[in-house]
Each structure stands twice: as structure tokens, then as C-alpha cells.
Amino acid sequence: MDALSDFFGTLSGVVWGPWLLIPLLLGTGLYLTIRLGFLQFRTLGRAMRHAFIDGAEGESTKGDISNYQALTTALAATVGVGNIVGVATALSIGGPGALFWIWLTGLLGMASKYTEAYLGVRFRTTDEKGEQVGGPQEYLKRGIKGPVGKVLAFAFTIFAIIASFGIGNMTQSNAVSSGLDTTFGISPMLTGAVLFVGIGAVLLGGIQAIGRVTSAFVPLMIIIYVTAGIVVLAINAGDIPAALALVFTDAFTGTAATGGFVGSGILIAMQFGVARGIFSNESGMGSAAIAAAAAKTTHPVRQGLVSMTQTFIDTIIVVSITGLVIVTTGAWDLGEDRAGGMTAVAFSQGLPGDWGGIIVALSVVFFAFSTILGWSYYGERNVVSLLGRAWSLPYRLLFTVVVFIGATTELTVVWNFSDLANGLMALPNLIGLLILSGFVARETRAYLKFDSKLTASEEEVRRFREEQQMVWQ
């Protein structure tokens, strides 16, 4: 097992090294940010309104779930163990500076998330059951003509299926069973059985059931966790300025450096910050585009804006709460071997009695449960794309069994495996986003220009929307 862990760790180190995925991920996000005219900053208010206030407009709107349910499904898949354990791991290895790189990955990743969600809706199709099918496995081969697009789509499909059993399954269920065992003494076998039944029951209902479940409890679980974190930060308010200063200075000096070589600490902070950042918000991986493609929306731009808010909520809000609580309480210095319980320790220092550990443990349960649901849909869509509709039910059954295995088995290689699968999944998608960036920027500018009452009459806006729907639907 140690040899396998080392093997995955070595490959993950290459993929996530300073010469491959890190510059590609950050570079793609920066390039798309510039090409889209800093869209994530200009339209964040509008995006939030579309996500939480506006509904889908127009009777001709296609889709399987509402745009809000698509958002909560994507949030369900991303707000998971990475927001609690992943952030702690990054800080324990890369130092407080890793949080800066997580933030940067999130801010630039909003442009990547918008682009992939836009493309997911723009190139979606309808399967024989009448359900929407979209995501990188579709827009890479349909948007990029010739063998290049087909190769990229095939690579993404394979890596996404593999990743669904890592980031979206074993990592999550293992974290739940470990947390409940440590905090409440609940047997991993019992946890695995409950997860097996609960996940299986929801998956039988397909994306509609997943959308209903996630829209009901995802907002609640985020509010509870964030509120608890704010309480801890309020208690340690005097330490926040120093913590922020440490985050920014450490990002470029490297507390994690050893042997007097400062550069190694900077690279470690960057590597684990970016890796855990994408593990948390999945911007650039292409996964959220699969949920976006199922949404009822009047235009790809609108759903792209809605999906973009998911990265903001996940990274700028939830991850920031976790990271700042860990840094302000000094828990980040506990060491890598205690990273799994670092967040619980940090929350316990600010909340009375055992409430800190209890809230973190329950948050891991709900975050992980929701992530498993979201990723089951991502994996299933890629299996159907590769093998056909007949393989949908077998995949759901296998996925549910693996949930039980993950909860009841010591998985020492799971984090390295998940990092590797995430990186391999992101590579073809990022290449595709760069190739299709001009197309996305052109259509985005056109829609935003005519969708604003400040620059066009209501009649022009109505006519433009109708013309655009005829083009993309």
C-alpha cells in the first residue's frame, strides 16, 4: 500500500508541479479573465441575482432542473471534505501562504467556471430519455472540430469517471466515517451502511431527486458552518489582521521552507494551495458544466453567471472561513500528521464545550454526503456518454457499493489518487477552454450588450433573446 501511495504521490507531484498544471490552471484563468473583460468582477451582483432571486424566463426554456437546483447540485459536489480537511492539509504542508494561492485560484477560477458552464449549456444535447446531456465530454467534441476535440473529449470522459470514485466518493465517505468514529465513537461499518442506503435511495430518482435534495439542505449546511466560523473569528477578531498579513507574506516567503531554501517553501505553498483550491471549487475541471447543462435557462450566459457564483461561495466564503479560523487560532502549526483534525481543533478553541468538534464533524457528514450525490451524477453522465444509457443503472449500483468500501477501509492512498485524478481530468478541459475562448468571449459580449436596459430598448432586448434562443437551442 505504501508503494502504491508513493507511486500516486510521484505522479501527482509531476502533474501538479510548477511546469504543468499549476501554470496552465492559473494561466487559463487569467487569460479568460482578461478575454472576458474581468467578467467575474463586473457581473457578480447580476450573477447573484440570477442565482438566488430570478427564475428561468420564458415558456420555451429547456432543462431538467431549475438553474437554482443546478447551482446547489454543483455546490453539493464542490462544498465537501476539501473545504474542511483539504484546506487544513494545504495549510499544514504549505503554511498559511497556501490560503493566498487558494484565493487566487478561486478568483481566476470564476472566469474558468463561467466559461465551462456557458459551453455546457451551449453545446448540450437531449438523450433518448429526454434528459439534457452536456459538459466537457460534449462541448470538446462538438465545439472543437476534428480529431483534437474528440481526443480531448475522450480523455476527459475517462478521467472524469475515474475521478468520480476518488474526489466524489471514497475521499468523502472515508472522511465521514473517520470523523464520526473519532467524535461520537460510531462504527465505520454502521456509517458505511447508512451512507449506502441513503445515497442509493436518492440515486434511484436521478438528477431530479438529486436537485430536490441538494436544494433543500445545501444552503442550510453552508449557513450553519459559516455562522460557526464567523463566531470563532469574532472571538479572535484581534488576531485577524496579523493572520491576513501572515497569509500574504508567507505566500511569497515560505514558512514551509526547510534547509534554508526559501524557494522550496514558496513552491510548496503554491502547489498545495492551487491543488486544494481546485479540489475545493473544481474551477477548470469541467465537472460543474455537467450540472449546468441540466439547468432550465433562457441563455447559456445566464447559466454561466449562475454557475460562476458557486466558485465565489465555495472559495471566497466557505474556504476563507475555514482558513482564517485555522490561522487565527494557530492550529495550522499542529503538523501534517494532525491535518485531519486541525479544523475541529481550531473551531473548538473558539466555541464553548464540545460544540466546535461537533459542528465540524456534522459539517463533514453533510458536506461529504452532498458531494457524493453531485459526483454520482457527473460520473454517470460520462459513463452514459462513453458506453450508452444501458450502463446508467450499473454505474449507480457500483458507485453506491464503493461508498460503503470507502467508509469501511483505511485508504492511505486516497488523497494522492484524488489529486492525480483531478489533475488529469482538468488538463483536456483547460486546453479546450483556451481553444474555445474566442467563441465564448464573442457571444458573451453580444448577449450582455443587448441584455442591459441601459444600452438597449426593451424591444431590442426581447428580440435579441428570441434570436439567441433560436441559435443555441
Image (cartoon, rainbow, N blue to C red):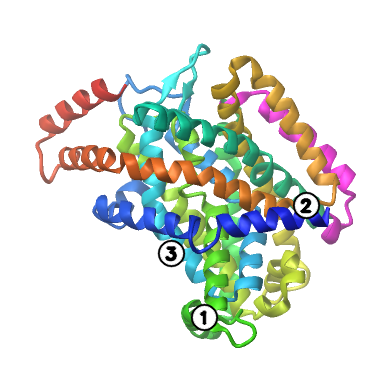
Compare marks 3 and 2 and give the one earlier in the sequence. 2
* Residue behind mark 1: 250
Distance of mark 3 from mark 1, alpha carbons? 14 Å
Query: Which residue shows up at 30% across the image and 31% down it?
Result: 299
* Residue behind mark 2: 4
At label 2, counting other C-alpha atoms closer than 10 Å, the crowd grade (few under 14, some 14-19, many 20 or more) is few
Is residue 79 magenta-colored?
no
Please determine whether, in this image, residue 183 is positioned above or below residue 247: above
Of residues 50 and 187, the one nearer the viewer is 187
Q: Which numbered tag is attached to residue 446?
A: none
Please determine whether, in this image, residue 264 is positioned above or below residue 242: above
Residue 219 in the figure: left or right of residue 347: left
At label 1, counting other C-alpha atoms closer than 10 Å, the crowd grade (few under 14, some 14-19, many 20 or more) is many
Farthest top residue in view: 128
* Callout 1 secondary element: helix
Q: Amino acid at mark 1?
A: Asp
Q: Amino acid at mark 2?
A: Leu
Of residues 147 and 178, the one nearer the viewer is 147
Q: Is residue 268 among what the camera can see?
A: yes
Compare marks 2 and 1 and give the one earlier in the sequence. 2
| Tag 3 and tag 1, C-beta contact below 8 Å | no
Residue 331 in the figure: left or right of residue 450: right
Query: Which residue shows up at 59% across the image and 71% down it?
Result: 231
Magenta part of the chain: 181-207
Indicate the quadrant where residue 119 lies: top left
Indicate the quadrant where residue 81 lies: bottom right
Residue 247 percent location from the top left of the image? 51, 78
Distance of mark 3 from mark 2, alpha carbons? 32 Å
Residue 143 percent location from the top left of the image? 35, 30
Q: Amino acid at mark 3?
A: Leu
